Image (cartoon, rainbow, N blue to C red):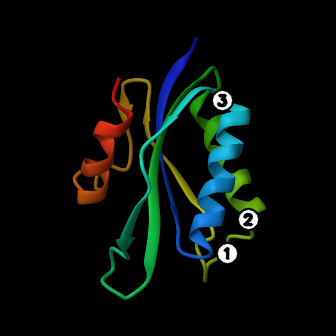
């Protein structure tokens, strides 16, 4: 079975480089990858840390658990740790099921969604 997926990408440490690297990895790993534009946002906790955020959509035959494990491995390749978000990739939608429901209403998600809609 093939699943349509939406993921969110974010980075606050060398964000342009890490987002570009992640996008290249997604392009070489998954089918029919499309990206939203990149958007600078402030940290949702209200501090002065800036992130680059982007959405991606693609197709995969991986089961959700395997997909999430693969994406977390991509994150860890950038040296992500508890103090710096070199790369954060979250599955927002897998097939017809949405995840991270608290994130869907966030302004940056709503601004970027039209970029990846067919």
- Seen in the picture, residue 15 relative to 82 is either above or below; the reply is above
Residue at 60% across, 76% down: 13
Which comes before the other along the chain, label 1 or label 3? 3
- Seen in the picture, residue 93 relative to 107 is either above or below; the reply is above
- The image quadrant that residue 107 belongs to is bottom left
- 41 or 103, which lies in front? 41
Question: Could you say whether the residue bearing mark 1 is in a helix, strand or loop?
Answer: loop
Between circles 2 and 1, the one closer to the viewer is 2
Residue at 37% across, 24% down: 96
Residue at 73% across, 52% down: 73
Q: Is residue 8 left or right of residue 29?
A: left
Question: Could you say whether the residue bearing mark 3 is in a helix, strand or loop?
Answer: loop
Q: Name the residue under label 1.
A: 81
The reply to whether dot 2 and dot 1 touch (C-beta < 8 Å) is no
Res 55 seen here: yes
Q: Quadrant of the C terminus?
A: top left
Q: How far apart are marks 1 and 3 (CA)?
A: 25 Å
Q: Quadrant of the N terminus?
A: top right
Q: In this view, does 54 lie to the left or right of 16?
A: left
Q: In this view, does 40 lie to the left or right of 79?
A: left
Q: Position of residue 72 (x, y in %)?
A: 66, 53
Report the disc number at residue 67. Answer: none
Q: Name the residue under label 2.
A: 78
Q: How far apart are marks 2 and 1 (CA)?
A: 9 Å
- 52 or 59, which lies in front? 52
Question: Could you say whether the residue bearing mark 2 is in a helix, strand or loop?
Answer: loop
Q: How far apart are marks 3 and 2 (CA)?
A: 19 Å
Label tally: 3
Q: Name the residue under label 3.
A: 30
């Amino acid at each position: 079975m093939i699943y349509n997926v939406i993921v969110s990408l974010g980075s606050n440490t060398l964000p342009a480089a890490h987002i570009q690297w992640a996008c290249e990895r997604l392009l070489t790993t998954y089918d029919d990858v499309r990206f939203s534009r990149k958007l600078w946002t402030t940290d949702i906790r209200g501090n002065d840390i800036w992130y680059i955020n982007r959405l991606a959509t693609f197709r995969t035959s991986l089961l959700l658990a395997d997909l999430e494990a693969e994406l977390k491995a991509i994150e860890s390749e950038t040296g992500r740790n508890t103090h710096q978000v070199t790369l954060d990739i979250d599955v927002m939608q897998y097939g017809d099921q949405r995840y991270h429901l608290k994130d869907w209403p966030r302004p940056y998600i709503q601004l970027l969604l039209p970029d990846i809609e067919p």
